[in-house]
């Protein structure tokens, strides 16, 4: 069965720096990968989708890369702000329009 | 648009009791999903539906039943609640091969 690992449970960075979150997966070749943001007590909110034939996707201060050889996705937040503090979830396409979610990385941006 | 709504927001059950969680979406989405989220486990798919009148099992379906009698509603039932079903339950919907839209969650405690 597929397995997803997100680099760490928690990541602390200084305001203004770039946050880099890692998502590694095994035993699968997803057609696409998604990233979600989840704030405490709320449901996840979609951020970005990247397909297997795309190397990189950008949206404002967010950038996602997808390396199907390494079976890895990197999620970057540039010029990070305290408001970016949240848990970020990686999700793989798992067939039949389903997603398989990682456990998430809790990001804290320190002012 | 309200998006995805869930009823109730909180519930406490005793072991053996039954209950139904209601999910409603107003985006005319074909796909609907029920997940549970537990600390350290991430989001796990319980059941899903690819259209009105259809349901299918996800990763952790045991102890749950679902129904999709109307396109906009997806019900999750617990026939005989167990303490292991204490969790936060999220409903989501999607138009297919795209991002999922999540509800605010239901926090269920089984004593």
Image: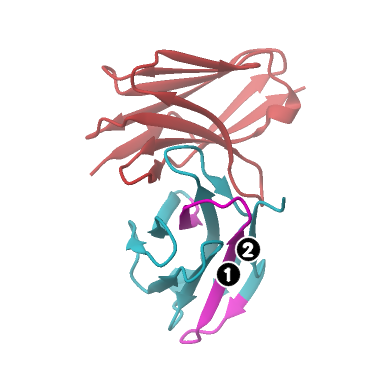
Chain colours: A red, B cyan
Residue A4 relative to residue B39: left or right: left
* Residue range corresponding to the magenta coloring: B12-39
Q: Position of residue B101 (x, y in %)?
A: 57, 46
Residue at 43% from the left image edge and 83% from the top image edge:
B80
Label 1 neighbourhood size at 10 Å, few (<14), some (14-19), many (20+)? some
Q: Answer with the quarter of the image where residue A68 lies.
A: top left
User: Vertical placement of B103 versus A8: above or below?
Assistant: below
Residue at 65% from the left image edge and 16% from the top image edge:
A60
Residue B1 relative to residue A94: left or right: right
Instruction: Kindly state the secondary structure of the residue where label 2 is placed.
Output: strand
Label 2 neighbourhood size at 10 Å, few (<14), some (14-19), many (20+)? many
- For marks 2 and 1 on the same chain, the one whose residue lies earlier in the sequence: 2
Q: Position of residue A82 (x, y in %)?
A: 74, 26
Q: Which mark is residue B75?
A: none
Most common secondary structure along the magenta stretch: strand
Q: How many marks?
A: 2
Residue at 50% from the left image edge and 16% from the top image edge:
A57
Residue A96 relative to residue A108: left or right: left
- In the rendered image, residue A65 lying in the magenta stretch gets the answer no
Report the chain holding disc 1. B
Distance from disc 2 to disc 1, alpha carbons, whole Å, reads: 6 Å
Q: Position of residue A14 (x, y in %)?
A: 69, 18
User: Vertical placement of B66 versus A3: above or below?
Assistant: below
Residue at 47% from the left image edge and 71% from the top image edge:
B69
Residue on which disc 2 sits: B6
Residue on which disc 1 sits: B22
- In the rendered image, residue B15 lying in the magenta stretch gets the answer yes
Q: Position of residue A2 (x, y in %)?
A: 27, 40
Task: Say whether marks 2 and 1 touch (CB < 8 Å).
Answer: yes
Kindly give the residue lying farthest to the bottom in the view shown: B16
């Amino acid at each position: 069965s597929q397995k997803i690992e997100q680099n760490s449970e928690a990541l602390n960075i200084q305001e203004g720096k770039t946050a880099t979150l890692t998502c590694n997966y095994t035993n699968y070749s997803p057609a696409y990968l998604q990233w979600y943001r989840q704030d405490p007590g709320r449901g996840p909110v979609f951020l970005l989708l990247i397909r297997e034939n795309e190397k990189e996707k950008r949206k404002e201060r967010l950038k996602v890369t997808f390396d199907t050889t390494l079976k890895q996705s990197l999620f970057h937040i540039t010029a990070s702000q305290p408001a970016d503090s949240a848990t970020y979830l990686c999700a793989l396409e798992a067939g039949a329009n389903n997603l398989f979610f990682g456990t998430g990385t809790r990001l804290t941006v320190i002012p | 648009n309200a998006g995805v709504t869930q009823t109730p927001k909180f519930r406490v059950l005793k072991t053996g009791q039954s209950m139904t969680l209601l999910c409603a979406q107003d985006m005319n989405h074909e796909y609907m999903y029920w997940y549970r989220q537990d600390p350290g486990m991430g989001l796990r798919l319980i059941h899903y539906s690819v259209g009105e009148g259809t349901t299918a099992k996800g990763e952790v379906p045991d102890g749950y039943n679902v129904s999709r009698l109307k396109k906009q509603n997806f019900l999750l039932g617990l026939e005989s609640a167990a303490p292991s079903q204490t969790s936060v339950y999220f409903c989501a919907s999607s138009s297919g091969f795209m991002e999922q839209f999540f509800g605010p969650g239901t926090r269920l405690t089984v004593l």
